[in-house]
Amino acid sequence: MPPEYDWENFSNVTVKRLFSMITTLGTAALEDEEKLEQLNNLLSEMEEIYSTGQACEYDDPKTCLDLNPGLEDCMADSTDYNRLLFCWEGWRDAAGRRLGDLYSQFVELSNEAVRADGWNDTGEYWRSWYETADLQQQLETIYQDLQPLYQNLHAYVRRKLINTYGAEMVNAEGPIPAHLLGNMWAQTWGNIYKLVIPFPNKPSIDVTDEMVRQGYDARRMFNLSDEFFREMGQIPMPGSFWDRTMFVRPDDREVVCHASAWDFYLDNDVRIKMCTKVNQEDLVTVHHEMGHIEYFLQYAHQPLPFREGANPGFHEAVGDLLALSVSTPAHLNKVGLLPELVDDPEVDINFLMQMALEKIAFLPFGYLIDQWRWRVFDGSTTKDKYNEEWWKLRTQYQGIVPPVPRNPDKDFDAGSKYHVPANTPYIRYFVSFVIQFQFHEAMCSLSGYTGDLHKCDASAGAMKDVAGSRLAEMLRMGKSQPWPEAFEVLTGDREMSAAAILQYFAPLIDWLEKQNENETLGWNNGWTPPY
Ligand SMILES: C[C@H](NC(=O)O)C(=O)O
Ligand SMILES: [Zn+2]
């Protein structure tokens, strides 16, 4: 059927862009009603399994732990090798194993649906949102630029874990057992800061204890974030946000506790759903989710197809960007969460280590999830190879290994990570972790700040209003133009680059290189811990 409008030949760029977006249907292109229903049923069944999964000891129901808070707290707080192993393996038995068959059925239907929309496979459709022909090459180049820093952090942390768990369980030249990094997926390592802190005798920069001491609750954490967005000249959270947001895990029903932000595209109805815990990690997550809400509010005036991030990485970067200012010891001191502020290079290194455990540790994880998924969608990774390929990438990029043998027929470890059963693309977080430092560098210089990038609190700059209004200008554009146009409004650049994140961590890189003089950088993929 010829198109009613010959929109591809329209001269008005904006109307042409609108048509191009409106005519892109994605999985909604699947005309077979029954198959579309099956696709959606598979998604809700996978979400149900993920949100109710539990690990129990000896099948004793009194010992059962949910992912949030029980199993995540186990991974965050325990330093008992075998207890960590119980939580790590228990979650994968409860969630991952039960999702393998459903996921492969989902892949087939998702591909059939996007092919009806003219895409080769779902991965190609997802990558199209970046409007960047050489996206994969650009990301690989940036990853290569960052790998030396990651390998230095990995070698340093590995040495510290040998000190904690012994050379039997952690090998000085091998990959690290995946359950020892303080997180269910080893994606951020902030929870083992206590094991790796460079200068333990210096004043703490972790504010969790102070938050608890001051009686912080979820709502106060959200208020602190909202106040910072206002201070930076952004749009305050609307009244309905405070009435309709889910701040904490309810005790009367099962919910998906993975934090999320929602745009109802109507009357400024925007909400967050989060099972907030009172700690520094969740204070950053509150800013992350509120960053999504801010973007929703800033582009609400745009025509519907433009009410998206300039690319998905932008949406993930907004909240983290502001959290980079909030997380500085100077800002935490200003809001009364850090009693004493000392100007001491060793405290700086402690701070940069804490940030690196969140931001550098994450980079290979953020990069590999969709490397795995794109190959599943394009068919080069077949179902029988799902788990083998998953661990090949996890060891190759992250330098970790499973602490117990994996059963290729039963285990589906990719399914133990929310975004796979929830079908949320993941490369957006790798993009975000790179561009948020380019945004931060721009905000800092626009605000008139001239010191070290890692010490910058943009809200302290004499010209913070200039920085805030430039950020708002970028956010207001939504997806009305290709992302380099929006990128240029705030940064003056048009390309992603690792330069800003490397500049932020420069003092730590020097320090780590000295620490690692006698360490092996990297790992031999073949080593496994004693089972
Ligand atoms: C980094 C990613 N953040 C998010 O989902 O909001 C995650 O938690 O895995
Ligand atoms: Zn997010």
Image (cartoon, rainbow, N blue to C red):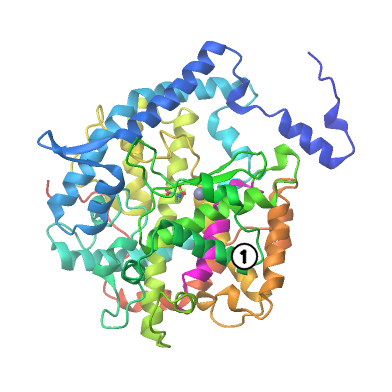
Whether residue 487 sits left or right of residue 7 in the image: it is: left
Would residue 428 be seen by someone viewing this image from the given angle? no
Residue 354, by quadrant, is bottom left
User: Looking at the image, which is closer to me, 275 or 426?
Assistant: 275
Q: Is residue 103 above or below residue 405?
A: above
Would residue 176 be seen by someone viewing this image from the given angle? yes
Whether residue 95 sits left or right of residue 348 in the image: it is: left
User: Looking at the image, which is closer to me, 221 or 408?
Assistant: 221
Query: Quick one: SS at disc 1?
Result: helix
Q: Position of residue 44 (x, y in %)?
A: 43, 26
Range of residues picked out in magenta:
309-330
Residue drawn where x is 47% and y is 17% of the image = 38
Q: Position of residue 16 (x, y in %)?
A: 82, 36
Inspect the magenta stretch and tell me whether residue 65 lies in it.
Answer: no
Q: Position of residue 457 (x, y in %)?
A: 55, 75
Q: Is residue 38 above or below residue 273?
A: above
Whether residue 152 sits left or right of residue 62 in the image: it is: right
Residue underneath mark 1: 230
User: Looking at the image, which is closer to me, 504 or 87?
Assistant: 87
Question: Most prominent secondary structure in the magenta stretch?
Answer: helix
